[in-house]
Image (cartoon, grey):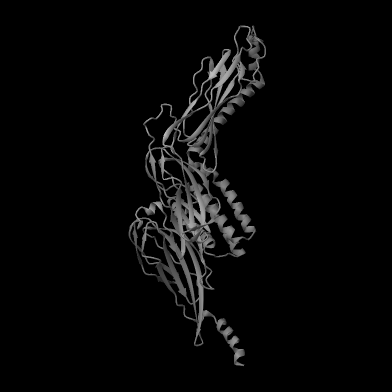
Amino acid sequence: MKKALQPILILLFFSIPFSVYSQNISIDAYVDRNKISMNEILKLTIEIKSDEQIEAEPEIPQLTGFQIIGQSSSSSTSIEIINNKMSRSVTQSFIYSLRPLKVGQFTIPPIFTKYNNKTYRTKSINISVVESQDSFGNQQQNQPRPKNTNGVKIFLQAQPNKTEVYVGEPLTVRFTLYSNKGLVGLNAEKMPEFSGFVKEETFQTKNITHTLEVIDGIRYYAYRISDYTLFPTYASNFTLDKMELLCAYEVPAKSFFDFGTTKRVYIQSNQPIIRVKPLPLQNQPQDFSGAVGNFDVKADLSATHVTTGESVTLTLAISGSGNIRTFDTPKLPNIHNLDSFPPEESEELFPPYNINGKKVVKYILIPEEPGSYTFPSIPFTFFDPQNEKYRTVQSKPLYLTVEKGKETSAGLSYIRPQGIDIQGSDIHFIIRQARISDFLLILFSFWYWMIVIVGLLSIVTAIIYKKERKKLLQDRAYYRSKISNKQLQKDIMAVHTAHKANNAELFCVNAENALKNYIANRCNISAGASKIQDILSELHKRKVADDLIPRIQAFLHKTDTARFGGVTFSSEELDDLSHELDEIITQLSRTKFRRKK
């Protein structure tokens, strides 16, 4: 009988309202370390503990020396029955990722929350920010140091194929992100500029895809981020610019009641040193064109037999590997009785690095006199970095036979390209008499004035179009403002599609992108690299209604929490969010985004 009553008694314990217990509420704040360097991220955790589930969030004061770059939240519940007494504890955790802005001693002030007209505060926390630590000398620049957080090792590596080159000699740099745990998000915070180099970005990732690599006995997920081909412009020792990324990965649940969360980490690449050597001046030929690499040259004529007045094309092809885009083409030797036009140049580069390929130069030549013409070998000089010396290659000589063409009645030959025929041997249809009355009749013609009016309107329209296009090209803010509505319509369609499909996760992603893109276009700021605090700060600087900024902050916080905090929304909540987005966009469209004086 007693055994039969035990399940019933347990159910009765759980059915007792928890509100009968006193509401013991406490709030604590802590960090994962008290001393960090400039290239590290500080994790600030605020925990609100209570006897029951309450609606309370921490209010973060203004932080000096730090920037909030990410946030997430989670909730866990524990129940204990000791001596027939049941106790329940609900813990809400709010995690913030803080990026240090400068070196120094800083204090995170007390953080508070309000519930039932009572205020609960945490203690202040002292943080020391130091310069980027380098315990391996120059190894920090040349080799990345994995960042180890909660067992997750992650680092961004810049991998040049050469560390010592000559001026003009191309080198390639690949940026690869390594992590021993799969990533769920990537965001570019800063891309390298490569001062002192002509750069070509030959690859940029569009999707989070990976391969598997083993480094020092550890298997990593390798994410190929970007590839660059660099052409140094002068001799010096260069420290390559670093790339900065914000990565997100999932932290698994610690208990049955913990649904897990998403953690963000700020990553900087290593900075390899590239030594660029000057080209040797000794034995440098006078006709050196600036080509660095290994090349060959070939010449060809479109025809070997022509008549005077016909054109012939001399094609010069320079193929090989090196700085194909930047060197000068060789000059064509001057040949008597041959007219030439400015050459046409084209380039054909082969992936993946646009180093191999060829440059094609076409010269249009027109012979004036009959006879036999010889095109001498055309030399091309380049610097071979492997052998560290100048080399000259030459094309084979070409021969052209020109016969006498047709003559006019005046005894002169017409110079004309191929494919154009002269109709007749002289000028025909010359009007010898003109009557003024014929011209006066045109002035009274309807079509004459119609053509004049249409021509004037076309000129005015062209002037207006030119000014508008010039303004769009020169004024980036004006251009982004013009396209903001078109971009907004596209983003809102994506939001409504996710809403109809009742896809809460996709809805939050599209809704956040729509709002951020619209604000970024109207304010002329970057949408991809903007955080919530950056957007709110920019809105404060402009003439935006004071009651609108908190609504935008609350909306972005909800979508960000749903994306990275694991929170889901019901259909009714999605309807409310969609209605709130429409009202925010409507109010923003009526606002003139001008900076306050």
Q: Quadrant of the N terminus?
A: bottom right
Is residue 83 depicted above or below 137 in this figure?
A: below
- In the picture provided, is 58 more to the left or to the right than 136? right
Q: In which quarter of the image is residue 144?
A: bottom left
Q: Residue 53, position in %: x, y? A: 51, 73
Q: Is residue 170 visible?
A: yes
Tell how many labels: 0
Is residue 596 depicted above or below 284 in this figure?
A: below
Q: Residue 257, position in %: x, y? A: 53, 73
Q: Can residue 592 be seen in this view?
A: no
- In the picture provided, is 434 more to the left or to the right than 13? right
Q: Residue 178, position in %: x, y? A: 48, 56
Residue 81 vs residue 423, the one in the foreground: 423
Q: Which residue is drawn at 60% across and 20% down?
A: 304
Is residue 415 depicted above or below 261 in this figure?
A: above
Residue 320 vs residue 454, the one in the foreground: 320
Extreme residue in the left direction: 105
Q: In which quarter of the image is residue 104?
A: bottom left
Extreme residue in the bottom direction: 1
Q: Residue at x 59, y 58 (%)?
A: 506
Q: Which residue is drawn at 41% across and 47% down?
A: 241
Residue 169 vs residue 581, the one in the foreground: 169
Q: Residue 330, position in %: x, y? A: 48, 27
